[in-house]
Image (cartoon, rainbow, N blue to C red):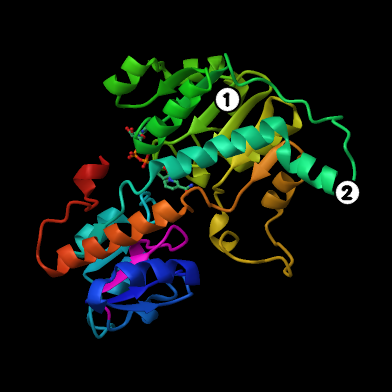
Amino acid sequence: MKVAIFSTKPYEREYLDRFNINNRHQLIYFDASLNADTTNLAAGFEAVCVFVSDKIDAKAIEKLSNAATQPQAVKLIVLRSAGFNNVDIKAAAEHHIKVVRVPAYSPQAVAEHAVALILTLNRKTHKAYNRVREGNFSVENLMGFNLYGKTVGVIGTGNIGTAFCQIMLGFGCNVIAYDIKESSALKEKGVEYRAFDEVLCAADIISLHCPLTPDTHYLFDSAAFSQMKKGAMLINTGRGALIKTADAIDSLKNGELGYLGIDVYEQEENLFFNDLSESIIQDDVIERLMSFHNVLITPHQGFFTKEALDQIAITTIKNISDFEDGLPLENEVTIEKIK
Ligand code: NAD
């Protein structure tokens, strides 16, 4: 099958090529991202393969499906991610385009990155590293706190949230959680489910592992920040718009929010995955965030481990092959599944 693969970097191409056994599929790589303005790049392809930085909204889908303007109407959207908030699933269904994703590639990769953000913000190893390299061995302002005995709140206890809970239980934390579906396996391990507001009030650290949906959009706004413990830490490796960034900035300025660690950002499309070190950043909001000493930003690298890239490539190729072979699509995202 001929597949247009968007927003690819050389490191990813290597993995996809390796698992495209006997070059079964014709994989054509594009650096460009796919959105309503770039759909012409998909002309002649039956399938497009996209990542989190691609925006497949209703307008893009209409153009992709239009056989009158495209030599070949697109019939399959293959996500190389677990999250699918960047694809209009309803519009895809209306245009008879199937959408498949990689539901669980390595939940530990993202969970461990969330822990890396916590430890770095808390113990300030990034600051110590720079300090020591300059011959400054002072510990002034490097004081952290013990994780042992602290209360950690987890929002969303699916694949990644479960892996995260297990790590935090290992640190000796009290783990409380909010999810619309409770996991009995986690309860048996000692995780206590509470109402959302109760998690906000009780947690010293909150980590977000739910998908971005209309229900979770701006879940953390000024109202939520005002209920959190003063000085608490918020970690987001989920999706940027789970947090209303403007409100987070206010909360950091007035000291309500003690630490913020984010691997995702609501306006990340034009920033993340690009080297902008020689450019003038036009996004004043992220510039303000970067100016706080108690904010740590990473560029959506939670998924970025060798094990996760292996699994993403294996599942992506399988999803394409299953579609071509007319087999049931076990990783299909349907409207029913997102309700
Ligand atoms: P998952 O589907 O296994 O789990 C999501 C959990 O969130 C489920 O238990 C679900 O019941 C719960 N949930 C849904 N709506 C909710 C709500 N309104 N309130 C509370 N909980 C709710 O997904 P996952 O594999 O654990 O991934 C979680 C999210 O992590 C993805 O949707 C994606 O946005 C993000 N992610 C980020 C990276 C990264 O590199 N930073 C990588 C992969 C996934």
Residue 57 part of the magenta segment: yes
Q: Is residue 339 left or right of residue 10?
A: left
Name the quarter where the N terminus is drawn: bottom left
Of discs 1 and 2, which sits in the foreground? 2
Who comes first in sequence, dot 1 or dot 2? Answer: 2
The three-letter code of the residue at mark 1 reads Ile
In terms of depth relative to the viewer, which is nearer, 54 or 273? Answer: 273
* Residue 35 visible, this angle: no
Q: Tell me: is circle 2 under 8 Å from ligand 1.
A: no
Which quarter of the figure has residue 20? bottom left
To which quarter of the image does residue 65 belong? Answer: bottom left
Q: Residue at x 42, y 62 (%)?
A: 55
Kind of residue indicated by mark 2: Glu
Q: Is residue 160 visible?
A: yes
Judging by the rendered image, the residue that carries numbered circle 1 is 205
Q: Vertically, is 171 above or below 65?
A: above
> Is label 1 within 8 A of ligand 1 (CB to nearest ligand atom)?
no
Q: Quadrant of residue 115?
A: top right
Q: Position of residue 212 (x, y in %)?
A: 41, 43
Q: What residue range appears in magenta?
A: 45-58
In this view of the protein, which residue sits in the foreground, 258 or 168? 168
- Residue 169 covered by magenta stretch: no
Secondary structure of the magenta portion, mostly? Answer: loop
